[in-house]
């Protein structure tokens, strides 16, 4: 049942969800602000690159250039006063928040009753949402580890010496897009889905759809191999007698490798294509060692796999692409 | 390129305004946080201040009024007169007192003067006596002894000079020796004692006058006096606004012990008026008193039931354990009252207040001061809830009996195995290759033999236990095995489909049955009924006499008759207005004559009804009753009685026929029942059985083949603790949260998505939770039928369920008394089970069914059964035991009341088990706080003179005892309205009887027994009427004497006094026994 605006309001106004609602507003704003500054700087960079004389005297990241302005300014008071103002405003926001919204406490805990929907704290909702698409081993252990290792690997991979300490888009195009896709488009969207879309039974409720704990939903998720009808019959002829009973499992495991390899190749080619698009990026690419390149490719391929799987699950109802007795992807 | 600004924007731009505004807003926020901290989040501070101010105003007003009233009273002529009396008495007493005081002062001086010399002399003489005494009396010491004696006598003769004060103030020198000193001193002490006593006598008129004044003032000015009011006012004005919290935890737990089981209660922080420090229990404060009648938010009134608070002291219990709500919360009314989605136990609404009692009083069947809860517990059993739903404490016997039968079965199995193994072992032993093996096998066989005998002993014990349990297990609905003898087959399907149309007050719920289901159930029940032996044919009876008996015997305490506004009687049993349409005359005669009679006994061990053939197989006569309850096949206990609470009225066959004839006239002559041709259709049998099992009919009815059927419903013992999510709101989930009732109306209290809401709707109509659900098979629907209860009963049952929680309180708060109150607790289960309260008033203020009947109004209330509020103090428990087992107190003449033969309403025989009788006797004893065990008081036999006096009182026209009390003479007893004295000896306890003959109205208000027969004079009871001169010499307690006389009265004595011979017990009309 759609059109239940009360339900939407309940979700939005729950004290638990306030950070997410704020995030929905703040993230686009600061993205815009960053781009605004970055593009202004890019124009300055262009100006300076066009005028080596100016580049020699110009030290400030302010655009446009004015000869009467001082080259350097003291931190105190010119930076400090801005920071003071920011600190004041943040304090005010936090105080008002604390005074108006109580801690979202609920009934006394009861070990025999779980809440419905049972949701993780908002900062873990992305992880919880991933559990919908991968088996717990992947979503709960492998992917989080990869995320942390990937974040740690960034300084190692980064071969681009430019763009430190000022906003720029032109000089760090790849880094920015990786962030926009990896964090904003994937992670934050997962968090938002977990907050606003997932209702009782962790089922999918569109906004203004009533959250009904008695809702019954029909959906069948199949593995890719089931769609292709992999049954292992032909494999059984080749296998030694001892392995025959496991023919189906082996066939599935083997079959799953194919789409994974295909995806890996396609994704690698796609990333490579992006890296080769401009002179600048080619220059950076050439500076990278083989280890750096391979590491970067692996992480980017993994990262992109997430939206692909979600897409497969939500649109084609495909559960796993590759199923093995030990893990499923 | 645009014109560039002249100055560096980073340098020149001013942030002053922004920072100023931010600082200002921040300051506002700080102020706000202070407000929230001290006022906003602590509303109780302002409540307390408001209470203090409005209560001070109230007290000041009271104080002014009180002072004015006191002034008026003190200046009234009566008071003045009393005060004059006082002054006069004082004037008289004062000079006398002064003289006495003077004398006492003189004596004190004289004593002080004598004392030093006396003490010195006494110690000297004392020591010399000692010296004399320790000298041996033998001849060799004679001279020493002599000298010591002399020395001592000299000391005694020695005189002391004393400055003796005289009355005129002069001092005289007196010379006194030892003896004189001693005498003087003792005389002084005596004189002083006399004078003090005299002073008391002199002051008595003054004291009396003072008492009279105080009494007068107290009568005219009840309540708190001005000094007390002033004290209260001072307390309130200096009230310290602070958090008031109560630690509802076991001793030794800190109040913030989060891990503890208990709870913290802070309700009094706002509800300040609960504290007796501010509002003493003698004061009841209302909103109007405080001038806050219009305020919707003034939680200051005092608790209306001070008695409850006395039993449950606030500093131990607090508020929320009884009232619900979140005792910890303080920041708003909603959270404190628990009226928000995250608190599972919101404050109870007024109609459910009694729910709070159940948490600790779950073991009670009847809880004082909780009429709604007590009513609910009766309903829960009586309306058959217990037939489907288990509830701890209800029907423990049924469960016990099943366990017993199961244990017997398993023991029998073990025994059979053993008996099979023993000969095998013995045989193996005989054939054993060597001695050792043989010995071992024989020993095993012996062990098993011993085991078998142990099993036999245990089984015997279990059989004994089940014998008494069989008597205690009762079903609330009729036995359907006898359906073929009792009912009109055409009526059954009508009844199932139109239960409430036929009997609007029935306790049978209305099941939602499709026509084909009705047919199947009827057919199954009919075919499953016992087919024989046929009932004895009964001749017709006298319906008019039957009606008279029906109206007067007490049938109406349980049964009702008449429909709509004409309906009278109790609801615990069926309405008989249309019984003539459904029932068989012969069966009803048998039922009325003795409702215990079963057509065939049932063996729970073999799971079958035992017919005459089974008895014949073992050459046994076909006799089964409580004394003959062993199964002929296996020797275990049979079900030999109908499991009904309907008692035996000990009627003759003729009387039973009369009543049955009357009942058969009770019918709607226009009623017509379609021929139930399907009733013998065996094709319906299987379906019918499935349905009967599905709907749990066997929970209330006894049905062949389903005797051991388990209850089909949810266990409700802790239903009130069930999380709300476990209740199936079905399609009403959203509506409940929005506060829309199933009928589409808005719930004035808002959301009913809570336990109360669910219970209310489920009890009102369980069907609504099926509405809109797709259930093509009728058996998929919810099983629960619609119970026949009204709004008030729904509230009562909802209260009961709401209170059925797993207690959040420490176990020590549970009401599980170990003293006499335990007997009261146990007794109420039996009293409510057998509906004793339908006839007898047992709890003070409790109403009986009979009291409400038209035939017992006004003067006719004298014909009501006796009030039992002091039964335990009145009767000898040994006698009560005999009486409860056989209320006719006779084995030959049973067609009568044993004690009050003059009453038309009859105490029936309940066939209680021995254990139930024991519990009832203890219950009555405990209810009257009688000592246990009972030790009968020895009565002193009367002397001739005493007997003379007693006879004089007994026959005095001022106390015509035999005018009302029965004597056993039929002609005399026609007008008797009180029991025969001959029963008193073994029946009554003498202390109670003394109280009864002196002040009967204080024991049973409104009794016909006259008060004022005796008056209290000089600490003894004296007969309040003329007595012959000889009897007036008696100086003992006359009430006590009369009781001793009555309790030792002999038939000859009574006959002599009433001038007639005692009549022999009536012959004939003794009940024919089966």
Image (cartoon, rainbow, N blue to C red):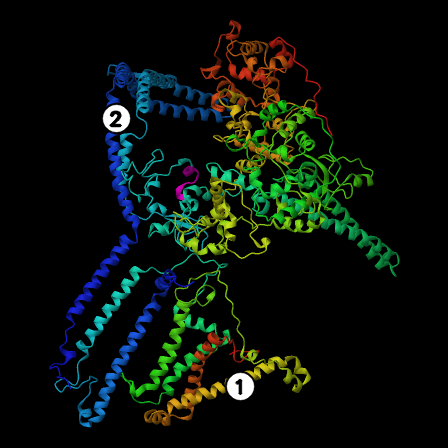
Residue A121 seen by the camera? no
Front in this rendered view, residue B621 or B102: B621
Residue B729 percent location from the top left of the image: 48, 54
* In the displayed structure image, the side of residue B508 where residue A277 appears, left or right: left
Q: Give the range drawn in magenta.
A: B308-315
- Residue under numbered circle 2: B69
- Residue under numbered circle 1: A258
Q: Is B16 a magenta residue?
A: no
Mark 2 element type: helix
Going by the picture, which residue comes out furthest to the top? B1029
Residue B76 percent location from the top left of the image: 25, 19
Contact flag, marks 2 and 1 (Cβ < 8 Å): no
Q: In which quarter of the image is residue B353?
A: top left
Residue A180 percent location from the top left of the image: 35, 80
* In the displayed structure image, the side of residue B60 where residue B313 appears, left or right: right
Q: In this view, does A55 lie above or below A217?
A: below
Front in this rendered view, residue B1042 or B164: B1042
């Amino acid at each position: 049942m759609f059109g239940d605006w009360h339900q939407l309001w309940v979700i939005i106004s729950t004290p638990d969800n306030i950070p997410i609602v704020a995030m929905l507003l703040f993230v686009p704003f600061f993205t815009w602000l960053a781009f605004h500054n970055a593009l202004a700087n890019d124009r300055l960079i262009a100006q300076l690159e066009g005028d080596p004389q100016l580049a020699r005297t110009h030290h400030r990241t302010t655009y446009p250039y004015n000869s009467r302005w001082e080259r350097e300014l003291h931190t105190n008071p010119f930076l400090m006063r801005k920071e003071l103002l920011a600190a004041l405003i943040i304090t005010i926001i936090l105080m008002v928040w604390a005074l108006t919204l109580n801690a979202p406490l609920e009934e006394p805990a009861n070990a025999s009753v779980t809440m419905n929907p049972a949701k993780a704290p908002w900062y873990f909702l992305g992880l919880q949402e991933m559990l919908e698409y991968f088996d717990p081993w992947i979503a709960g252990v492998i992917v989080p580890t990869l995320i942390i290792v990937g974040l740690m690997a960034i300084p190692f991979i980064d071969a681009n010496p430019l763009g430190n300490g000022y906003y720029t888009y032109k000089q760090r195009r790849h880094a920015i897009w990786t962030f926009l896709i990896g964090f904003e488009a994937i992670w934050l969207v997962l968090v938002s889905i977990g907050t606003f879309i997932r209702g009782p039974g962790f089922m999918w409720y569109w906004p203004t759809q009533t959250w009904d704990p008695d809702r019954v939903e029909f959906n069948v998720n199949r593995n890719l191999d089931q769609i292709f009808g992999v049954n292992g019959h032909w494999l059984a002829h080749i296998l030694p007698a001892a392995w025959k009973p496991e023919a189906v499992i082996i066939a599935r495991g083997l079959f799953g490798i194919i789409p994974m390899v295909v995806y890996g190749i396609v994704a690698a080619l796609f990333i490579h294509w992006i890296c080769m698009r401009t002179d600048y990026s080619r220059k950076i690419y050439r500076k990278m060692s083989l280890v750096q390149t391979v590491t970067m490719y692996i992480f980017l391929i993994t990262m992109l796999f997430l939206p692909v799987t979600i897409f497969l699950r939500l649109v084609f109802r495909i559960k796993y692409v590759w199923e093995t007795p030990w893990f499923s992807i | 390129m645009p014109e560039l600004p002249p100055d560096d924007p980073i340098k020149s731009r001013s942030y002053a305004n922004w920072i100023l505004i931010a600082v200002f807003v921040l300051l506002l926020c700080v102020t706000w946080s202070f407000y929230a901290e001290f006022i906003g989040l602590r509303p109780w501070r302002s409540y307390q201040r408001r209470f203090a101010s409005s209560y001070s105003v109230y007290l000041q007003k009271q104080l002014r009024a009180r002072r004015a009233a006191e002034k008026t009273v003190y200046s009234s002529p009566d008071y003045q007169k009393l005060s004059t009396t006082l002054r006069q008495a004082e004037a008289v007493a004062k000079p006398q007192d002064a003289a006495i005081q003077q004398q006492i002062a003189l004596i004190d001086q004289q004593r002080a003067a004598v004392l030093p010399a006396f003490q010195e002399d006494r110690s000297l003489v004392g020591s010399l006596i000692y010296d004399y005494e320790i000298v041996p009396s033998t001849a060799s010491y004679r001279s020493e002894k002599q000298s010591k004696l002399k020395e001592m006598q000299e000391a005694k003769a020695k005189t002391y000079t004393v400055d003796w004060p005289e009355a005129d103030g002069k001092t005289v020198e007196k010379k006194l020796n030892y003896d004189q000193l001693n005498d003087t001193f003792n005389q002084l002490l005596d004189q002083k004692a006399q004078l003090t006593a005299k002073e008391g006598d002199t002051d008595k008129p003054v004291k009396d006058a003072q008492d009279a004044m105080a009494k007068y003032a107290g009568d005219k000015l009840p309540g708190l006096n001005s000094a007390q009011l002033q004290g209260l006012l001072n307390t309130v004005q200096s009230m310290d606004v602070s958090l008031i919290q109560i630690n509802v935890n076991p001793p030794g737990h800190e109040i913030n012990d989060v891990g503890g089981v208990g709870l913290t209660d802070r309700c009094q922080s706002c509800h300040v008026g609960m504290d007796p420090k501010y509002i003493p229990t003698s004061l009841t404060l209302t909103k109007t008193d405080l001038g806050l009648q219009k305020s919707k938010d003034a939680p200051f009134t005092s608790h209306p039931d001070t008695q409850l608070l006395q039993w449950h002291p606030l500093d131990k219990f607090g508020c929320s354990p009884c009232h619900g709500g979140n005792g910890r919360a303080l920041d708003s009314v909603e959270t404190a009252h628990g009226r928000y989605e995250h608190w599972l136990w919101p404050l109870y609404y007024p109609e459910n207040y009694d729910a709070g009692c159940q948490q600790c009083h779950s073991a009670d069947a009847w809880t004082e001061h909780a009429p709604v809860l007590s009513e609910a517990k009766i309903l829960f059993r009586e309306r058959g809830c217990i037939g489907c739903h288990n509830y701890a404490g209800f029907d423990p016997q049924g469960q016990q009996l099943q366990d017993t039968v199961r244990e017997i079965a398993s023991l029998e199995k073990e025994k059979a195995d053993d008996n099979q193994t023993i000969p095998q072992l013995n045989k193996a032993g005989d054939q054993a290759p060597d001695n050792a093996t043989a010995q071992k096998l024989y020993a095993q066989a012996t062990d098993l033999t011993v085991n078998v005998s142990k099993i036999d002993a245990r089984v015997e014990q279990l059989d004994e236990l089940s014998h008494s349990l069989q008597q205690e297990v009762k079903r609330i609905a009729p036995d359907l095995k006898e359906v073929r003898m009792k009912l009109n087959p055409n009526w059954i399907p009508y009844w199932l489909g139109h239960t409430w149309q036929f009997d609007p007050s029935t306790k049978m719920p209305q099941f939602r049955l499709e026509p084909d289901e009705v047919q199947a159930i009827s057919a199954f029940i009919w075919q499953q009924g016992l087919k024989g032996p046929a009932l004895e044919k009964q001749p017709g009876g006298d319906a008019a006499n039957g009606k008279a008996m029906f109206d007067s015997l007490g049938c109406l305490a349980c049964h009702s008759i008449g429909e709509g506004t004409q309906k009278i009687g109790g609801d615990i049993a069926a309405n008989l207005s249309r019984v003539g349409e459904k029932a068989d005359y012969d069966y009803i005669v048998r039922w009325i004559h003795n409702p215990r009679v079963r057509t065939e006994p049932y063996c729970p061990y073999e799971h079958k009804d035992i017919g005459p053939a089974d008895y014949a197989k073992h050459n046994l006569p076909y006799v089964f009753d409580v004394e003959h309850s062993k199964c002929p096949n296996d020797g275990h206990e049979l079900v030999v009685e109908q499991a009904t609470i309907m008692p035996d009225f000990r009627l003759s066959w003729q009387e039973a026929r009369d009543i049955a004839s009357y009942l058969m006239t009770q019918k709607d002559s226009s009623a017509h029942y379609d021929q139930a041709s399907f009733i013998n259709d065996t094709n319906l049998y299987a379906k019918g059985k499935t349905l009967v099992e599905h709907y749990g009919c066997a929970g209330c009815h006894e049905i062949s083949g389903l005797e051991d059927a388990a209850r089909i419903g949810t266990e409700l013992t802790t239903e009130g603790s069930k999380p709300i999510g476990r209740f199936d709101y079905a399609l009403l989930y959203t509506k409940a949260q929005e506060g829309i009732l199933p009928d589409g109306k808005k719930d004035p209290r808002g959301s009913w998505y809570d336990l109360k809401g669910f219970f209310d709707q489920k009890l009102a109509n369980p069907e609504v939770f099926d509405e809109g659900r797709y259930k093509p098979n009728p058996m998929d629907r919810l099983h629960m039928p619609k119970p026949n209860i009204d709004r008030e009963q729904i509230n009562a049952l909802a209260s009961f369920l709401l209170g059925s929680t797993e207690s959040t309180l420490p176990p020590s708060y549970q009401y599980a008394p170990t003293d006499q109150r335990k007997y009261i607790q146990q007794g109420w289960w039996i009293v409510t089970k057998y509906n004793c309260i339908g006839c007898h008033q047992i709890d003070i203020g409790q109403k009986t069914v009979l009291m409400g009947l038209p035939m017992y109004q006004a003067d006719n209330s004298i014909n009501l059964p006796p009030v039992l509020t002091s039964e335990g103090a009145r009767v000898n428990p040994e006698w009560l035991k005999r009486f409860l087992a056989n209320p006719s107190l006779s084995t030959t003449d049973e067609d009568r009341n044993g004690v009050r033969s003059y009453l038309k309403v009859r105490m029936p025989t309940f066939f209680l088990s021995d254990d139930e009788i024991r519990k009832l006797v203890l219950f009555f004893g405990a209810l009257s706080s009688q000592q246990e065990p009972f030790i009968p008081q020895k009565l002193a036999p009367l002397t001739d003179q005493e007997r003379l006096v007693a006879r004089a009182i007994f026959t005095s026209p001022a106390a015509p005892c035999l005018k009302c009390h029965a004597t056993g003479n039929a002609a005399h007893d026609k007008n008797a309205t009180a029991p025969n004295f001959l029963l008193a000896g073994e029946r009554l306890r003498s202390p109670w009887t003394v109280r009864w003959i002196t002040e009967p109205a204080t024991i049973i208000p409104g009794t016909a027994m006259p008060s004022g027969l005796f008056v209290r004079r000089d600490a003894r009871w004296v007969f309040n009427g003329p007595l012959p001169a000889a009897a007036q010499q008696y100086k003992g307690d006359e009430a006590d004497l009369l009781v001793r006389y009555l309790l030792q009265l002999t038939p000859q004595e009574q006959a002599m006094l009433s001038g007639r011979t005692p009549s022999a017990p009536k012959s004939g009309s003794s009940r024919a026994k089966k």
